[in-house]
Amino acid sequence: MTEFIEKLKNIPMHMDYEGQARAERLSRIIVTLFGVVGFIWGYIIQQFSQTIYILGAGFVLAFIITVPPWPMYRRKPLDWQAPQFQVTESQTKTKKKK
Amino acid sequence: MHSFLTRANAILAYTLSVCACLTFLCFLSTAFSHYDTDVRLRTFKTVVKNVPDYSASREKNDLGFLTFDIKTDILLIKYFNKIFIFNWNVKQLFVYLVAEYQTKMNSLNQIILWDKIIIREDNAILELKNMNTKYYFWDDGNGLRGNNNITLHLSWNVVPNAGLLPSISAKNVHSFAFPSEYTTSRL
């Protein structure tokens, strides 16, 4: 059981900063596009319910594409500094003063 | 946008904003449409009786009977060379027939004789023949016998998806007279 939880925790759930920006932009574009197309189609056939259904389809698509942290949103990880284990005493003191 | 839930929340909120915006645009696209139309009304078999109205009092009041025809095509609109019965901001119509007349007691009497709900899937071209009234044509006195100027008006409410609730009356009215003698026999 604990192994299972460990595995779950190890699933990468994060997006990098670039990925977050891409996800947001993509979701906005998808929902807006489906809304506009739905509006035009609903006007042509004079059925407003179709507009709402098409907008709903856009929501589902945007949800699938941009909510789960797909690998394409993890292409530019931050270049973290390597962890430093040897910390001298003088450094810790100066940090405490700050 | 850093976690699963914040992204889901952002998309849902944005979709709802777009939905509200589209609904408002739908209202704007139909805000200036004209819904009035021609109607042809005819009446037959007008009969008036003098009977006690037990629901109000024991006094004898005038009760009118009539049969009528209605012919109209409500809300036929044309877009892109195609004829639609309803535009996209109409959910249903509530159609009702009103009789208006003047008596010595009241300068204006209005009685609803008949009504009908027409939903989107229905045929909005009304062609009704020899209809009986749905509600009683009670006068609150003796104003119906020999009354020769009773007008029938067809009106309807347009129930929209969003926006105003227009109440429209057809331009043409039909006037008729009740006979000057009470009918005593059973109808």
Image (spheres, coloured by chain):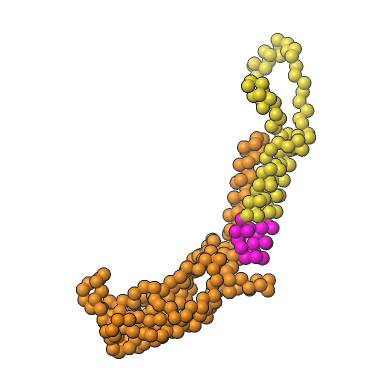
Is A70 above or below relative to A42? Answer: above
Determine the colour of chain A.
yellow
Q: Does the image show residue B144?
A: no
Please, is residue B133 above or below residue B29 in the view? below
Provide residue B80's location: percent of width, then percent of height. Answer: 68, 71
Q: Given the current orientation, which residue lies at the most extreme left position?
A: B58
Q: Residue at image x 63%, y 20%?
A: A2
Q: Is residue B75 left or right of residue A37?
A: left
- Name the dominant secondary structure of the magenta segment: helix
Residue at far top of view: A89
Looking at the rendered image, the quarter that the C terminus of chain B falls into is bottom left
Residue name at image x 69 percent, y 32 percent:
A13
The spot of residue B153 in percent (x, y) is: 43, 79
User: In this rendering, would B48 be left or right of B130?
Assistant: left
- Give residue B60's position: percent from left, percent from top: 23, 78
Q: How many marks?
A: 0
Comparing B33 with B179, the one in front is B179
Magenta segment, which residues? A36-52
In terms of image quadrants, where is residue B122?
Answer: bottom right
Residue ID at (78%, 35%): A75
Q: Please check the rendered image and state whether residue A41 is part of the magenta-colored stretch, yes or no.
A: yes
Looking at the rendered image, the quarter that the N terminus of chain B falls into is top right
Q: Is residue A49 left or right of residue A28?
A: left
Colour representing chain B? orange
Compared with A52, B123 (above or below) is: below
Whether residue B129 can be seen here:
yes
Query: Residue B78: x and y, percent?
Result: 63, 73
Q: Is B98 covered by the magenta stretch?
A: no
- Residue at the image point whose x is 73% and y is 37% from the top: A70
B57 lies left or right of A72: left
**Can you name the residue that lies furthest to the bottom here?**
B180
